[in-house]
Amino acid sequence: MSTGRGRGRLARPATAVACGLAALAALAALAPEAAAGAVAGASGSGPLAAGPAAATSAPAVGNAVPGATPGAAAGGGSAGAGAAAGGGAGTQAAEFPPMSQTLSDVRQNGCRKPAARAADRPSWSQVFLRPEAVWPLSRGAGVTVAVIGSGVDAGAGSGSGALAGRLTLGPRLHGDGDAGRDCVGHGTALATLVAGRRPADGGPSGVAPAAKVLAVAATDDAGSTNADLLARGIRAAADAGARIGLVGAPIAEAAPALADAVGYATAKGMLLVAPVGPDNQAVNAPVYPAGYPGVLAVAAIGSDGAPAGAGVSDSGGGSAGQAGGAAAALGPGRTSRVDVTAPGEGLLAAGPGGGTFTATGPSYAAALVAGTAALVLGRSPSLTVEQLADRLRSTAYRPGTALPDPAVGWGAVDPVTAVGAPAAAGAAAGSTPAATADPVVVPPPPDGRPVRLASAVTGVSLGGAALLGLAAAAARVGRRRAAGQAGRNGQDGAGTPTAE
C-alpha cells in the first residue's frame, strides 16, 4: 500500500507535465496570431535613417492609397495611429468653434470672439506629421515665414502667446493700423499652425516652433481681398526678408500685378505656398496665386488620407459639399495643379484673443507645408526657392498613382524625410528636379512569418525545457519521499514483536 502511494505521488508530476505540454502546444498554435500583432506594431524603422518609418499603415510606393495614415508611421508608432488620432481629434475638434476664412457678418456682429477654452491635446495633424521627430535637427530657428492674409493677433506675440518673441507686425494694406489686428482670426490660426510654441499642457503646437512670423494684412476686416492687395502683400513680405510666404486668401482671377509679384518674390529668394482653393467652397477653375508657376500649391487631406477640406462641384453645377470632396476642389473642367498635400480637416488652431478653434480647408494645409519648409530651411538655409520646393515634393509620401496625381500631386508632405533623409541632399545640390526624382521608398512591413515561427519554436522549446526540468525535480522529490516511507516501514517491521 505504501508503494502504491509512492507511485501515485510520482504519477502526478508526469500528469502535470503532459497537461502542461498540451497547453503549451495550444498556446503555440495561437502564438502566430499574437506574434503577428507584435511584429506589426514594431515594424517601423528609424525616422532619420531611410526616410519615413514604415508601420503597416504607411503607404508603399506603387500600391497604396494616397496618405494612408502615415503619420504615426513617421515616428515608428503603431499601425493605424494616424487614423486613430484623427478620429479622436475629430471628436475633440467638435468641442471647439469653427474658424472660417472670411467673416461675412463682421458689420453686424463685430470681429470674431475668442474661444471659451483651449485644447489640452495635440491636433491629429501633429500625430500625422510628427514634426517633433526632427526638432533635434531643426525647429525653424532663423527662418521667417510671412503670413499674408487677415493679419495676426498682436497678443499672440507677447506674454504667454503662442508666438511670443517671434512675431513681427508688418503693414496693413487695407484700412488703418498695422497687421496686429486680426478681425477674422484666420491669419492668427495660420500663424500658430506654422510656428506656435509647444504648450506646457500638451495642446496643439506649430510645425516649426522656433520660426519667426511676419504678419502682413492683405484683406479687409471680413477677410476679402483682391489681386492688388495680394500683390502688394507678397512684395512687402519679400522686401522684409521672409524666406517663405504663406498666402492664406486665394482669389479666383489671374492678374498681371499678382503674377509679377510672384516672380519678384521668387527672385528675392522667397518660396510662396498657397492653397489650391478657398476653404469649404466648390471651385471649377484654378485660383491664384497657387495657379502660377513657381508657387507651391497645397491641397488638404483628412485623417484617413483622402482629399478633404473643400467642396467639389457635382455634374449639375451644384456643390457636393465636403462628403468625398477633394481638397483640390476638383470640379468639372478644373485644371489647377496640386503639388503636395497636408492635413486640412478638423485641425485645432489658436484664434485671436486665445482659445482653440476648429480649422478645415486647404489654407490650413498650406500652413503646415509652410511650417515644414521652415524646418527644412532651418537645417539647410542655403537652399534656393526651386531646391526647397523640390525637396518638399520629392520627399512626400507617394500616392501610388501616376505622378503628379491630379488630386494629391506628389503626395503628403513629410517633415521627417524632408529634413533628415539622405536623399534630400541631392535636391539640395539642385541635381534632382522634382519631376524626375526617384520615389521615396517606404518599405513594406517585414514578413512576420519567420519571426512568428521562430518565436513559436523558441517558446515551445523553452517552455518544454522548463516543464521537463520541473518534472525531473518533482520526480526526485517523489523518489526521496518513497525511499523515506520504505525506510520507515522497514523500521516498523523490525521493532514490533509478533505473536508466536
Image (tube, rainbow, N blue to C red):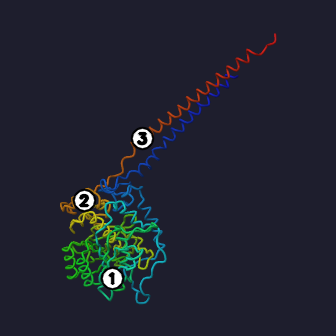
Kind of residue at badge 3: Leu
Relative to 63, 358 lies left or right: right
- Seen in the picture, residue 6 relative to 33 is either above or below; the reply is above
Dot 2 corresponds to which residue?
A: 424
Mark 3 secondary-structure assignment: helix
Rounded to the nearest angstrom, the CA distance separating label 2 from label 3 is: 38 Å
Give x and y (percent) for residue 371.
32, 69
Rounded to the nearest angstrom, the CA distance separating label 2 from label 1 is: 36 Å
Question: What numbered label is drawn on residue 453?
Answer: 3
Q: Residues within 10 Å of mark 2 (few under 14, many from 20)?
A: many
Kind of residue at badge 1: Ala
Relative to 259, 103 lies left or right: right
Q: Residue furthest right?
A: 500
Looking at the image, tell me whether mark 3 or mark 1 is earlier in sequence order. 1
Q: Residue at x 26, y 57 (%)?
A: 439
Question: What numbered label is drawn on residue 25?
Answer: none
Mark 2 vs 1: CB contact within 8 A:
no
Give x and y (percent) for residue 271.
24, 71
Give x and y (percent) for residue 280.
37, 76
Dot 1 corresponds to which residue?
A: 179
Residue 311 in view, yes or no: no
Quarter of image, res 490: top right
Which residue is more in the foreground, 294 or 117? 117
Mark 1 secondary-structure assignment: loop
